[in-house]
């Protein structure tokens, strides 16, 4: 693994500091999901952890972060360390990544034990009832709940719960495209053209 492979935008370096909740929110293109995937894989390679990758709705593994993690495994040069299966990813040291939808599997969700980190992608869609099931499920000593999302409405449960009135042990970080030193040139051009047509958008 080269040094450049483990670089992170400054605002994403918070992922390596302990906190019960890590809340990354903002506009698209900020490398939030990219950074979380990369951080989890590096942590999982350094010590055995159990990671639950969830989202409110997941009808198939294709709707999960499975492919993003696979891309990062390749980019980090960790293909010899991680074994990729259709529905899970395992490390040679016992690290495990599993994938689940929150809304349609409340009973299954309650059965997850020993989770070290739960990563909730597109967390703006997570309902109050799903949070109330997930949070007490992630109860291992030192366990953490990470979330990445692009806010939709200020009234959304996730935004209110973790941004407007965050818990005490929450690391809340707003991240936008200009915090990403690797912001794709194609998106930069799209953004500049959109500014000319519709500044509000």
Image (tube, grey):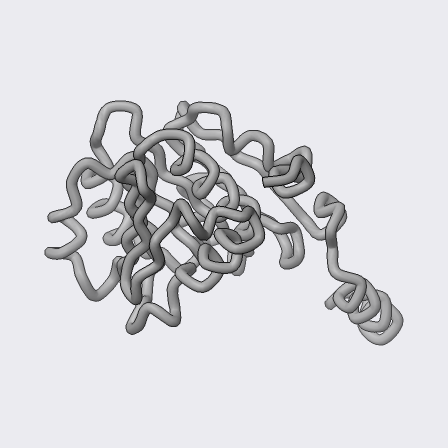
> In the image, residue 162 lies at what x, y percent?
44, 39
**Horizontal arrangement in the rendering, residue 155 relative to residue 93 (left or right):** right
- In the picture shown, does residue 42 fall above or below 133? above
> In the image, residue 106 lies at what x, y percent?
16, 57
> In the image, residue 184 lies at what x, y percent?
74, 60
- In the picture shown, does residue 127 fall above or below 62? above
Give the residue at x 27% y 58%. Answer: 100
Is residue 154 visible to the viewer in this orientation of the structure? Answer: no
- In the picture shown, does residue 96 fall above or below 198? above
For this orientation, the residue located farthest to the bottom is 197
For this orientation, the residue located farthest to the right is 196
Residue 121, quarter of picture: bottom left
**Horizontal arrangement in the rendering, residue 48 relative to residue 171 (left or right):** left
Is residue 5 visible to the viewer in this orientation of the structure? Answer: yes
Compare residues 135 and 15 and report the one nearer the observer: 15
Give the residue at x 52% y 53%. Answer: 72
**Horizontal arrangement in the rendering, residue 3 relative to residue 110 (left or right):** right
Give the residue at x 30% y 66%. Answer: 86
Compare residues 40 and 70 and report the one nearer the observer: 70
Compare residues 58 and 159 and report the one nearer the observer: 58
> In the image, residue 94 lies at what x, y percent?
26, 39
Quadrant location, the C terminus: bottom right
């Amino acid at each position: 693994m080269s040094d450049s492979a483990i670089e992170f935008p400054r605002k994403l370096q918070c992922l390596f500091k302990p906190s019960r909740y890590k809340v990354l929110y903002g506009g698209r293109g900020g490398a939030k999901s990219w950074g979380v995937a990369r951080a989890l894989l590096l942590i999982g390679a350094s010590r055995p952890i159990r990671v639950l990758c969830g989202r409110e709705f997941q009808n198939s593994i294709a709707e999960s972060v499975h492919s993003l993690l696979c891309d990062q495994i390749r980019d980090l040069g960790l293909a010899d360390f991680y074994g990729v299966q259709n529905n899970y990813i395992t490390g040679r040291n016992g690290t495990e990544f599993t994938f689940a939808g929150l809304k349609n599997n409340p009973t299954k969700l309650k059965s997850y034990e020993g989770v070290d980190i739960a990563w909730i992608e597109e967390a703006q869609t997570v309902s109050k009832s799903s949070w109330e099931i997930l949070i007490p499920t992630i109860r291992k000593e030192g366990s953490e709940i990470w979330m990445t999302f692009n806010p939709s409405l200020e009234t959304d449960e996730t935004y209110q719960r973790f941004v407007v009135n965050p818990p005490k042990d929450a690391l809340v970080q707003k991240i936008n495209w200009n915090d990403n030193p690797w912001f794709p040139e194609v998106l930069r051009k799209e953004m500049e053209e959109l500014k000319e047509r519709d500044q509000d958008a």
